[in-house]
Image (spheres, rainbow, N blue to C red):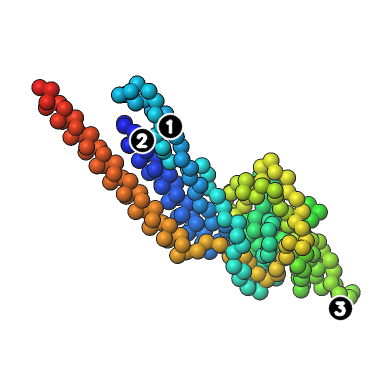
Amino acid sequence: MESPSYIALSRLTGLRREMDVVTNNLANMNTPGYQRESMMFSEYLADTRDMGAGAFRKISMVQDLASVRDLSEGPMINTDNPLDVAISGPGYFTVETEDGARYTRKGNFSLDNNGQIVTSEGDPVMGMDGAPIVLPPEASDVVINKDGTIAVRDPANPLGGLPIGQIGVVQFEEEYELKREAGGLLNAEDQEPMAAEAEDVSILQGMLEDSNVQGVVEMTRMIETMRSYQSTKNMMDQEHERQKQAIQILGSSGR
């Protein structure tokens, strides 16, 4: 395979991965807390031998380095569900899974049979103290303040609330390094979480942060990617035909 074919193949590989990212964004357009992704491309210079001069020369190929999450905040949706919460500002909820602590901005929580606040997948939501948050039996009038503190009606004090705990919100120095997993979760791997700065973050009760995916933008990206893919493939077909004709001509002249 000659250099033009290698260059085109590298381009096709990158475009195929770009298409995978775009379709995943569209599939999660209505997933609470989902952050859109885009591909990061760079130029990769490879050495190839120049047969005429007997030396090496550089050819420029496409290299897809990684997918990058868009950390911009999504629009807020009012649900009036007291256990739906959204983070306004940078930060993530901490949840405990079978594989350890994971992090998310997906705040559609509920109560399990033990009164624990859990995610839609059933994973316990961690409080600031690092323990699951458990509401007392028959708790009512759950109030979640902007700092994440949770209170329920106190039968002994109708005018006051009974504090239960505080939802934990954490931040990371290298936020882009978080690895996406199933269920809207992120894996911090070797990073240590830090408690979010109170002045930077507010917890909004009865709200959900919607995905920051813009459907029109992603559809435009999909069309552009498909056109680029088809254009590159046509170029490869033309190059293949050129080489085929050259071989036929050279073969005929050598008889």
Instruction: Name the N-terminal-most of marks 2 and 3.
Output: 2
Q: Is residue 110 visible?
A: no
Q: Provide residue 185's location: percent of width, then percent of height.
A: 62, 52
Q: Secondary structure at mark 3?
A: strand
Q: Provide residue 79's location: percent of width, then percent of height.
A: 63, 72
Q: Provide residue 211's location: percent of width, then percent of height.
A: 56, 62
Q: Amino acid at mark 1?
A: Ala
If the image is split into quadrants, where does the C terminus sit? top left
Q: Are marks 3 and 1 in contact (CB under 8 Å)?
A: no
Q: Mark 2 to mark 3: distance in Å?
A: 74 Å
Q: Are marks 2 and 1 in contact (CB under 8 Å)?
A: yes
Left or right, residue 240 beside residue 45: left
Q: Nearer the viewer, mark 2 or mark 1?
A: 1
Q: Which residue is most to the front?
A: 53
Q: Which mark is residue 159?
A: 3
Instruction: Name the N-terminal-most of marks 3 and 1.
Output: 1
Residue at 46% x, 40% y: name it. Answer: 43
If the image is split into quadrants, where does the N terminus sit? top left
Q: Amino acid at mark 2?
A: Tyr
Q: Which residue is mark 1?
A: 46
Q: Which residue is mark 2?
A: 6
Classify 129 as above or below 162: above
